[in-house]
Amino acid sequence: STREGFSTIPSVTWEDVGGLDHIREEFYRHVIKPLKHPEECEGFEFCSETGFMLYGPPGCGKTLVAEAVANEAGVYYIHIKGPELLSKYVGETEKEIRKLFSRARACSPCLIFLDEFDALTTKRGSGEGAWVVERPLNQLLAEMSGGQARDGVIVIGATNRPKEIDPAVTRPGRFGKHIYLPLPNAVQRGLILKSLARKVPLDPSVDLDEIARMEGCENLSGADLKYLVKEAGMLARDDETCSKPRRIKKIHFEDVLTRIKPSVTMQQ
Ligand code: ATP
């Protein structure tokens, strides 16, 4: 649903997001409430952040959260990847960043989701041609430091490699609020499975919390759980031993769990 640079209101809702209620809460305080109930926030604009950095392993809901926030806020959403800003417009990058923000301001309130943020930053002084990376970054920070409410532009950055981000980037007033999205625990896996299984033919006997605790489910990311549901669905569809209409049963999940491998290894 996210075409690069295309601004629209995403269709993802918090119902699609499992196990991240505390993060929803955080965004409610900083983004949703000031937008939806400005009268209750009058005089307190100073205490809410408009720049966020989501970090954590791949497939754990960073994109999903950004889309759900934009949906709940009812604001336009621009999805852009760090490397694209760079590779497409070397030399022109600063201009592109300026354009990005002026476009966002023109359709404000607007949320910019800047995925793979680490591509825009290197450790200062390291590597040949590091300035190519730093100048656009300075441009970006200048755009972000512009004014209290930043004219209704919210920026959410995302990275799998927080250590590669210059601390200058993550100061208050810039990407000041840092939010960690870890691999889900068993309880969260259960909640993720429930949100993923809402629209699939699940046998009523299946206990998704039990599935979430089973061997093979440990260390699975949200993206892996999506794959689990998909594969179990395929097995159910083709299961000749099941009477029709066919439904996904515990055995189908068990079958997939014997061979599924976590996409995130502990080294990451
Ligand atoms: P990357 O770093 O690879 O971009 P990401 O953290 O942005 O990953 P998402 O794109 O949000 O991950 O997640 C990938 C898919 O995994 C989602 O489309 C969704 O189907 C599933 N998923 C991940 N986390 C959750 C969650 N908390 N609840 C429900 N589904 C999830």
Image (tube, rainbow, N blue to C red):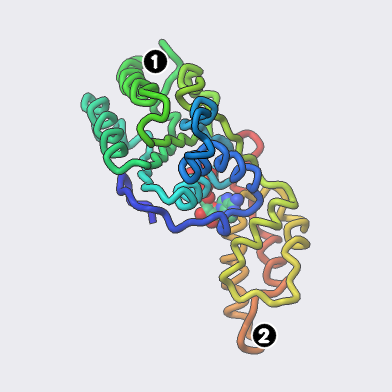
Q: Which residue is mark 1?
A: 127
Q: Residues within 10 Å of mark 1 (few under 14, many from 20)?
A: few
Rendering coords of residue 64 (x, y %):
51, 49
* Image quarter of the C terminus: top right
Q: Amino acid at mark 2?
A: Cys
**Depth check, front residue: 232 or 189:** 189
Ligand 1 within 8 Å of the CB at mark 1: no
The image quarter in which residue 106 lies: top left
Q: Which mark is residue 21?
A: none
SS under mark 1: loop
Rendering coords of residue 169 (x, y %):
46, 21
Q: Earlier in the sequence, mark 1 or mark 2?
A: 1
Q: Which residue is mark 2?
A: 242
Rendering coords of residue 26 (x, y %):
60, 39
Residue drawn at x 58%, y 37% is 56
Q: Decide: marks 1, 2 in contact (CB < 8 A)?
A: no
**In the figure, is residue 89 to the left or right of 177?**
left
Q: Residues within 10 Å of mark 2 (few under 14, many from 20)?
A: few
